[in-house]
Image (cartoon, helix red, strand yellow):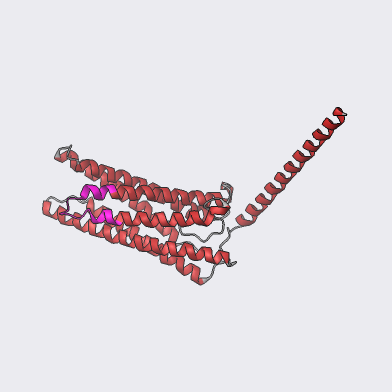
Amino acid sequence: MVKLVSVRRTRLYGPAAWRDWWEYINAFVYLVATIVLLVGCILLLPGRSSAKLGLILVLVALALLVIVNLHDLIAQLAGFDFSLPLLSLDPQLALIEILAPLLQVLGSILFFIGTILLLEVGRGKYDEKQAENLTNHAFRLIIGGSGLWMFGSILNVSQVYERVDMRVQFMQKMVSIPFLMSSTLFLVSGILGAGNFPYPPAVIKVRATAVWIAITASSLLVLAAILNTKRVIELHQLAAAGGLLEPLRGGAQERLDLEREEEGTSRDRQKYAANVEEGSSYKAGVVMAE
């Protein structure tokens, strides 16, 4: 499961006065979501009577993950003023800062729908054949969602920085590698859960194994989320101390700065023209009054 890991100085999580706090909130909510997901997976262990509650907790966690990663995606887009042509200049901006959280959102949605189908099966409203078909559809969606998470995790791990120091890059890998391991284990868990075996006890054992693998994957997510929170705090300390964060590449940063400078100049000219016009109107009014 890929949570965007970035030291791009263009990320913009909110207004200037609340920018850092919004990023802290983003990281904290992600941590809460991973803990809820872990608890939900534990409640799915065979022999427990709380499987329904476990699925509900999984749904809550997935909903939080969608919100956090949408916020992450918007933060990256807002960081370069939603100027999509810049994506062609900086491939990593397109593939990692934008595509990675988008894959996370789509994967979480597929996982969410699959979990809802499993809840429907648990209500006992379907006959054996219908329940089996619905369960198979649910696991296919979970496999698809996990596959998107893993693809996004691979993109995240492959990110290369040129300006930041080794300590910051080490923090990045300490977060992104557990995410890759976790998403891979979720994929394996989904594949095992979707397996059809003619011998019922084998199905029970395999699906129990799938739940244990999902618990291991969720535990890795909690670890990665803790490291991600620590990383966000240290990045803010680095930025406050004047440390160098990663700019956009391929001329994208220069073009962004130029566009912002031109926009600021244009705004100043419009403000000056408005002031001149207001002054002229006031002067004309005084003359007419006289």
- Total marks shown come to 0
Whether residue 235 can be seen here = yes
Q: Is residue 55 magenta?
A: yes
The residue lying toward the viewer, choosing from 246 and 231, is 231
Image quarter hosting the C terminus: top right
- The residue drawn where x is 26% and y is 42% is 117
**Residue 110 spot, x, y in % from top left:** 34, 45
Q: Position of residue 84 (x, y in %)?
A: 56, 47
Residue range highlighted in magenta: 38-56
Q: Is residue 110 left or right of residue 49?
A: right
Look at 25% across and 50% down and name the residue there: 54
- Position above or below: 2 against 270: below
Percent across and percent down for residue 46 are 17, 54
Residue lying furthest front in this view?
Answer: 290
- Image height of 276 relative to 206, above or below: above
Depth check: 5 or 34 in front? 34
**Percent x, y of residue 170:** 46, 69
Q: Quadrant of the N terminus?
A: bottom left
Which residue is depicted at the point 31% across and 61% down? 219
For this view, does 33 lie left or right of residue 13?
left
Q: Classify residue 240 by image quadrant.
A: bottom right
Q: Could one spot residue 88 in this view of the protein?
A: no
Q: Is residue 237 left or right of residue 153?
A: right
Is residue 33 rendered magenta in the image?
no
The answer to which image quadrant residue 4 occupies is bottom left
* For residue 70, side relative to residue 221 (left or right): right
Question: What residue do we see at 53% from left, 53% from top?
Answer: 18
